[in-house]
Image: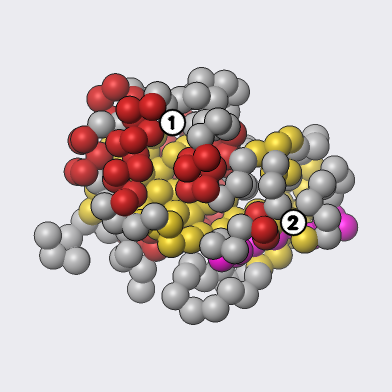
Amino acid sequence: MANSDPFKVLVFSKTSAYRHASIPAGIAAIKALADRTKLFTVEASENAETSMTSSLERYAVVVLLHCSGNFLDTAQVDALKKFVQSGGGVVGIHGAAAGLYNNEWYGALIGAHFDMHPDPEPGRVLVEQTGEGIISVAHGRDNWMDEWYNFRTHPRENKNLGVLLKGDTTSFQGGKMGEDHPLAWCQEFDGGRSFYTALGHFDEAYADEWYMDQILKGILWVAKRQA
């Protein structure tokens, strides 16, 4: 396939624990990105028995949209692992960090597992400069309304991660990561690439140009189609 041809993206949103009400908005927004840019096509599924199999080889990118709990069995995780090891890209959005707590490989793929969050409130998102060759976020954001995720391990301890965004911990309550509170990152991982953002709890995020530009850049980066 020529590099200019549209590539295929699977948006997978199966949940086995908490289910985010913003899943439909997220699916619609990613489909809208595909329609607007003509860079990729989107299929959405919550059927692991049909999607998380050898059929993953049809896709360049899998978006894990708010997947939670034990949403994949061992064979399905193995299929996802094979997909990544074959060069596939994974984008994890918000609740995806609350999936498969007992699977070390999945935790490394996402970058860190979700621990807890304080009550949602507006806060400030800061951009971290991490060098060339990864996703570029033009500017931060004041008064961003979200759940400010805390993680079971500090993302900064994972030296494989290129941190893209962090929270200004003076702007919201309940942070447990110290003054350094990473919120989005990307990495070369196990033969493929992954991008994760902890932002995106509410429907409004998926109608926001600043946020959706990051999702677009994440999809393109893990697909190795970035500018």
Task: Reply yes or no: does residue 168 show up in magenta.
Answer: yes
Quarter of the image where the N terminus is located: bottom left
Q: Which residue is mark 2?
A: 181
Task: Reply yes or no: does residue 144 show up in magenta.
Answer: no
Would residue 141 be found to the left or right of residue 90 on screen?
right
Residue sitting at 44 percent across and 75 percent down? 133
Q: Is residue 207 visible?
A: no
Which is nearer the N-term, disc 2 or disc 1?
A: 1
Q: Identify the magenta region.
A: 162-171
Q: CA distance from mark 2 to mark 1?
A: 26 Å
Image: 193 above or below 30 = below
Would residue 7 be found to the left or right of residue 117 on screen?
left
Three-letter amino acid code at the position of disc 2: His
Residue 100 drawn at (x, y percent) = 52, 31
**Most common secondary structure along the magenta stretch:** strand
Q: Which mark is residue 41?
A: none
Q: Which residue is mark 1?
A: 13
Mark 1: secondary structure? loop
Three-letter amino acid code at the position of disc 1: Ser
Residue 16 drawn at (x, y percent) = 51, 20
